[in-house]
Image: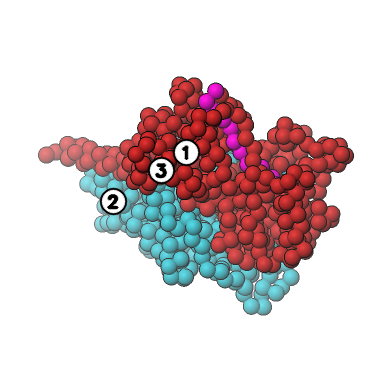
Chain colours: A red, B cyan
Amino acid sequence: MTTSTRRTVLRATAWSSLAVAAALAGCSKKDDTAPAAASAPAAEAAAAPASAASAPLKIAFAYLGPVGDGGWTFAHDNGRKALEKELGSQISTTFVESVPESADAERVFRDMVAQGNTLIFGTSFGYMEPMLKVAADNKGVKFEHATGYKTADNMSVYDNRTYEGAYMAGVIAGGMTRTNTIGVVGSIPIPEVIRNIDSYTLGAQSVNPKVKVKVVWVNEWFNPPKETEGAQSLIDGGADVLLQNTDSSAVLQTAEKNGKYAFGWDSDMTAYGPKAHLASAVNIWGPYYIKTARDVIAGTWKPGHTWWGVKEGAIDLVSISDKVPADLKAKVDKVKAGLKDGTFAIWKGPIASNDGKVQVKDGTTADDAFLGGIKFFVKGVEGQVPGAK
Amino acid sequence: MDTYALLLAATLNAGTVLAIAGLGLLVNERSGIVNLGAEGMMLVAAIAGFATAVQTGSDWLAFGAGALSGAIMAGAFGVLVIWLNTNQYATGLALSLFGSGFSAFVGIHYTQERLQSRPHFAIPVLSDIPFFGPALFRQHPMVYLTILFTIVLTWFLYRSRAGLVLRAVGESPESAHALGYPVRRIRLLAVMGGGALCGVAGAYLSVVYTPLWVEGMVAGKGWIALALTTFATWRPSRILLGAYLFGGVTMLQFHLQGEGVQISSQLLTMLPYLATIVVLVLISRNPVWIRANMPASLGKPFFPGS
């Protein structure tokens, strides 16, 4: 064997081993980020309860993150578990986690249809277009999309009024701050997040008119080191109670490290920072999932927009810390009761934006269309919404 | 005033992660090997370190576990590119992808875990000096060790015999080989050493800096460290300064946002890479600079006996 042929052989071996390495990398990635058509359903079929004699309604969930994220996706999976517990053998559920908001999502939805699912939940904004496409091709399947705005004959939109949780957290923050400065780590400056920041501010001002709110944007839903850096800079800037509209528990843990206060978001995060944790503003998706499944079984399902909050039991402020004084807790309870029976509205005038313009006139209450398009900071928030003039 | 002290403190902390990884990559690039797998190695080390810290409660054992896992991954990479002469860039990318998937897979059960309360560090007396105390003397020991290590590494590369051999291997592996040095083994050692340092950086991120484990948490810091080696024209002291500069830009951006000054964070995110390209353009147009700075055999395979 000459040197050059030996080298060729060596090189061929090397490339093939590289190919194997790459394939391995691809596989391991697929297992937990992109859904592998073969492996995912098999694994989850085992997890689903044994179906009863009458054909159960097959329901599938597509999640943005891993179920162990302790936040957004974790809350959706708790909803799925509540659904299984409530309807038992009438349904069977499966889920695919870490579905990217890309062309892969469409494949996942088509896969779910092919597996015989007749009710499909997509739990992230970015699934809107893929779902619409798949919905148009599969009229017999019902699609439910979280946090979007487009519907079809067989596709509904649902969301929670997360700003109600933010308002209640604000009430506690306003009462607990010593520096009269509280902070928010924002994700992406869209109306939903801006509305939460504003509501947090309004809640804080309801008990402490002097309070100022500082905001930093990390421009991502999920980037723990960046969330940590953002939280640290807010604390360094004097904020002593933090809220985050991001998906990890990093902000709470940063507050814990610095001896400041913070809240849990989406899921109960007490365990991540027992000393810093004041309360958790949680999403409870179970009731909606149960109602939707019941509607489909009964044949009464209709497409539409659903926006549930405290009133329907979809939003709550839970695990309020013992450090929060009783009078503050009572105020939160009052807000909660008011939201439940409809006697209290968060977005009731007069509300001005921080450039002095009146946004909601005295005596009027903002409607859902207004809330859906909020692009301004209320008075008390420092700075401007990025991209706003 | 105090705010600026804290800003400086946060900058040092943020820069430390980048500096440790950057110094590690510098060591293996000085031997002529480019390892694009930094991100993957840091992720695997982050979960290895975090799991160790959860189980044992010791930060130092966690750094050890991070270093070990980084070295193992780098060792596998080294065998592939040094003995089998696979393409360094493709293999490095594969390592990076493998690391992100593998770390997510083994880390599933640790996403809900949290570490015991984190200790606070302060150097007695010095930490009480106004401004300088909170700014400089209340950091994790790793921050000071990194500075010390930069000095040691500079001495090693430019003043020790072993450092000279390492640089010779990176400049001209043929000459080093002709002089009787085991080029491949030296390269493997350098690559594993670099992997170990990337591992320490990953463990520092998940155990001290953030401190938590979630999938994909390194979030691009490995790539910034790679860019940093070029930005610093392969000099340890410049890596340290560059790391503080990049760390400082991030923290300043958040600080300004908190003050209500709007500044585009997207623009700042691309700044390290933009700076790297500028440096590359500057040194590439001048043959003397290129020879003076870039290891001559960087990224090229070496066939002994050819």
State which chain disc 3 sits on.
A
Give the residue at mark 1: A62
Residue at disc 1, secondary structure: strand
User: Residue at 29% across / 56% down in the picture?
Assistant: B185
Q: Nearer the viewer, residue B258 or B306?
A: B258
Residue A53: x, y in percent?
Answer: 34, 39
Which quadrant is the C terminus of chain B positioned in?
top left
Q: Are marks 2 and 3 in contact (CB under 8 Å)?
A: no
Residue at disc 2, secondary structure: helix
Describe residue A46's horizontal placement relative to residue B202 as left or right: left
Image: magenta residue range: A153-164
Specify which label sits upstream in the sequence, 3 or 1. Answer: 1
Give the residue at mark 2: B79
Q: Does residue A163 belong to the magenta stretch?
A: yes
User: Residue at 47% across / 55% down in the picture?
Assistant: B111
Give the residue at mark 3: A89
Residue A356: x, y in percent?
Answer: 86, 40
Same subunit, labels 1 and 2: the answer reads: no
Q: Residues within 10 Å of mark 2 (few under 14, many from 20)?
A: some
Q: Quadrant of residue B265?
A: top right
Is the residue B118 above or below the residue B299 in the image?
below
Residue A353: x, y in percent?
Answer: 82, 40
**Residue at the outermost left position:** A1
User: Residue at 42% across / 50% down in the picture?
Assistant: B104
Camera sees residue A191: yes
Q: Residues within 10 Å of mark 3 (few under 14, many from 20)?
A: some
